[in-house]
């Protein structure tokens, strides 16, 4: 099962995303703030990160900087794709996210849950095409 780290401090949105991703067959590791995200990345290999920018303790930008410089995170998660989901939609914020390694930058107000989950599935399929994503049986 493909593992996704969801880093989102909004309880409502994180619950929606967790449930939807699980329904689509992903295992979701959840972090409420930037510190929890770094701790998780040091110990749990994941295939993709969904990362908010405005977070308690450490911003998403700081998390992305840490991913690039922390050897333990690098060894655990080589070539880790990061998708930013944020309310910050200014061009300079989007450029900064891309410069720090985000493969995609979504503005929450302009992106539906369906679109976001669809893009996650596309990216996971692209990086691990030999592992089909199958929803869990109930």
Image (cartoon, rainbow, N blue to C red):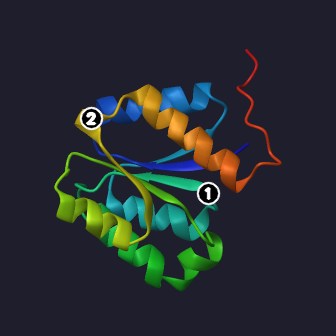
Q: Which residue is mark 1?
A: 46
Residue lying furthest front: 91
Residue at left offset 46%, top offset 79% = 68
SS for tag 1?
loop
Q: Would you say residue 5 is visible in this rendering?
A: yes
SS for tag 2?
helix
Instruction: Tell me the quarter of the picture where residue 25 sits.
Output: top right
Q: Nearer the viewer, residue 112 or 71?
A: 112
Side of 102 where 53 appears, left or right: left
Residue at left offset 27%, top offset 35% = 110
For residue 102, above or below residue 27: below
Name the mark on residue 10. none
Side of 95 where 24 appears, left or right: right
Residue at left offset 22%, top offset 54% = 54
Residue 117, x across and y down, in percent: 50, 34
Q: How many marks?
A: 2
The alpha-carbon separation of the residues under discs 1 and 2 comes to 26 Å
Side of 10 where 131 appears, left or right: right
Label 1 or label 2, whichever lies nearer to me, is 2
Which part of the image, by quadrant, shows the C terminus? top right
Q: Would you say residue 59 is visible in this rendering?
A: no
Instruction: Tell me the quarter of the picture where residue 104 sits.
Output: bottom left
Q: Which residue is mark 2?
A: 110
Q: Verify CB contact (< 8 Å) between mark 1 and mark 2.
A: no
């Amino acid at each position: 099962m493909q593992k996704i780290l969801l880093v989102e401090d909004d309880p409502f949105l994180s619950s929606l995303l967790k449930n939807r991703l699980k329904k689509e067959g992903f295992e979701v590791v959840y972090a409420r703030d930037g510190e929890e995200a770094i701790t998780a990345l040091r110990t749990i290999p994941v295939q993709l990160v969904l990362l908010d920018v405005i977070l308690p303790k450490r911003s998403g930008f700081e998390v992305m900087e840490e991913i690039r410089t922390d050897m333990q995170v690098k060894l655990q998660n080589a070539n880790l794709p990061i998708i930013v989901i944020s309310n910050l939609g200014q061009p300079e914020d989007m450029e900064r996210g891309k410069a720090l390694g985000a493969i995609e930058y979504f503005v929450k107000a302009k992106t539906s849950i369906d679109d976001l989950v669809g893009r996650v599935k596309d990216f996971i399929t692209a990086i691990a095409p030999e592992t089909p994503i199958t929803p869990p049986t109930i």
